[in-house]
Amino acid sequence: MDLQHAVTHYRRLIKETGWLEEGMAWTVILPVSGRLSVREAATRLTGDSRPELGELEPGFSDVVSFGRSGEAMMLFEADGFSHAGHPEALERLSENARVWHVSWNLTGRRMLSHAAQGKVLAEMLDFDPGWLHGIDPGSLREEAAILRGIGRYRPPTRYKTKVMAMVEQRTGARLDKLWLGQPQPALSLDRPSTEREVAFRGSAG
């Protein structure tokens, strides 16, 4: 898959779906073997053996939407205050799997994470290679090199589209306007209190 072709796709997607610019979280699970069902993904996310799945169109706050793309399972959260991006959730989601997570929200927080086999291997805060850390930061070395090549003082969308394209390259999953415009299996979850507090401080500042 050509990286620049994917970048063009996500640039168009963000432009045509205006609210994506403000915030979103996209988590992609690539099982080591077999396929992951929506219910199993929801169970891993919540730690609840009987998650209450419904069906909603992606775009609502505090809702996690699920969908298959190729061999991968996608989790999508519209406002970027992510449940799936928390380390404990990434650990559960990555059992016998590899997981990539990208998110940003209206507080300005941006994150790229990689987890595998029940461990968060690397996190890159603000998509800044200088802030790459974890027990295996080298697992995001290629992504760091690409982002370093963008240079400083570029528009935020330049970084966002590049990171989404890199997740697609790693997993084969693609987020598109057609999927976002249709009802998908979904879980309604309360936003973690720490995220609410950050959002409040950001809006109050």
Image (spheres, rainbow, N blue to C red):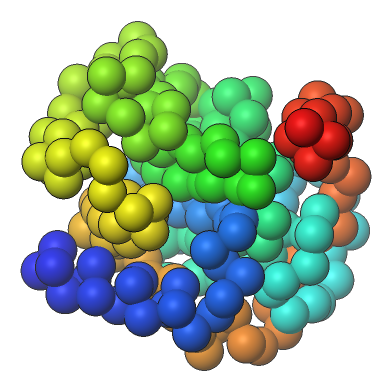
The reply to whether residue 47 is visible in this rendering is: no
Residue 141 placement, left or right of 115: left
In the shown orientation, is residue 199 left or right of residue 18?
A: right
Q: Toward which corner of the image does residue 130 lie, by quadrant?
A: top left
Q: Where is residue 85? Give x, y as percent.
A: 59, 37
Say which quadrant the N terminus sits in.
bottom left
Closer to the camera in the image, 194 or 204: 204
Q: Position of residue 123 (x, y in %)?
A: 40, 25
The quarter of the picture where residue 72 lies is: bottom left
State the image coordinates of residue 147 (x, y, percent, origin top left): 20, 40
Vertical order, 10 against 83 (above or below): below
Instruction: Give the residue furthest to the top.
Output: 135
Judge by depth and name the residue closer to the eye, 69 or 14. Answer: 14
- Which residue does the image show at 57% across and 52% down from the upper left? 25
Residue 202 appears in the figure: yes
Question: What residue is drawn where x is 52% and y is 89%?
Answer: 178
Viewer-side residue, 5 vs 20? 20
Q: Is residue 52 left or right of residue 39?
A: right
Q: Is residue 119 above or below residue 103?
A: above
Where residue 43 appears, as percent x and y from the top left, is 73, 45
Q: On the rendered image, what quadrant is the C terminus found in?
A: top right
Q: Quadrant of residue 107?
A: top right
Q: How many marks?
A: 0
- At x 81%, y 54%, the residue is 62
Image point 34% across, 44% down: which residue?
A: 32
